[in-house]
Image (cartoon, rainbow, N blue to C red):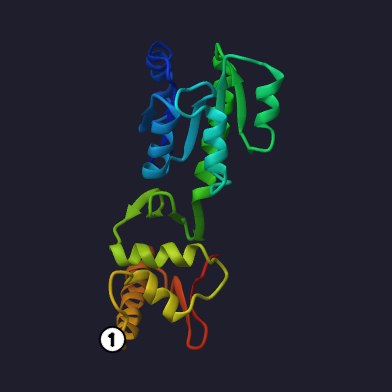
Amino acid sequence: MNKPTLLYAEDDKDTRDSFLLILHEYFDTIYIAKNGEEALALYSEKKPDILLLDITMPLLNGLDLVKTIRSEDQSTPIIILSAHSDTENLLCAVGLKLEAYLLKPIDLSLFDRTIKKIIKQVEVKDIIYLGKELHWDSSRSSLIYKGKQIKITKKEKLLLELLSTNLGKYVSHDELILHIWCDEIPDHSHDNKLIQLIYRFNKKIMKQLSISSHLVENSYTLGYKLTCE
């Protein structure tokens, strides 16, 4: 499984360079920002799994950056780093759903416990158990069986993407067609395309897992859903 990605925003170069050595022990991919505006742009473009933000940055400070992000994203874990323990900043941080508010110089033991806990939360949240040692990793759009990735097509990924966000519920034929063939104008041919896509996908999974039941279940009137065990 790939490690979660991190956005690290810190305006002080010496601090940034030295702390990056530590961060690379936990993350393979780190997006680096030198100010709040850069951080916001990287967040919007890269959609990192975890944010680590200095509170005092030029152009857009850490707390204002978090407020902007939280206006549309309530779930991405955020850690704020601050060289100050003043009451004003602590009060401003209340209600922003921060995972942690850590003071500089960073207590490395505390940071280790904090970041490992958040990484575990992110990994568990993104993994959907489908039974038979089969998992869907929504953050990577990967189907995993016994720890190994099953090769699936782009349209099969789009199929799983929508069905996995509606676990236990049927998704209509029309909704699936619009999602999977989002770059096409739907016509009557897409009904058959969807049927064939799901037939081939079920056949592939049955062969890979040596099972006799379909992963994607069909209801003529309701649509399709994943059959999780």
The image quadrant that residue 98 belongs to is top right
The percent position of residue 166, horizontal first and vertical second, equals 53, 66
Give the camera-side residue of 100 and 23. Answer: 100
Residue 208 appears in view: no
The percent position of residue 99, horizontal first and vertical second, equals 61, 33
> Which quadrant would the N terminus be assigned to in this image?
top left
Q: Secondary structure at mark 1?
A: helix
Which residue does the image show at 64% across and 38% down from the upper left?
Answer: 97
Image: 170 above or below 38: below
Mark 1 = which residue? 189
The percent position of residue 119, horizontal first and vertical second, equals 51, 36
Please indicate whether residue 102 sits to the left or right of residue 94 in the image: left
Which residue does the image show at 50% across and 61% down from the upper left?
Answer: 130
The percent position of residue 33, horizontal first and vertical second, equals 39, 28
Residue 113 appears in view: yes
Image: 101 above or below 228: above
Please indicate whether residue 39 sits to the left or right of residue 90 in the image: left
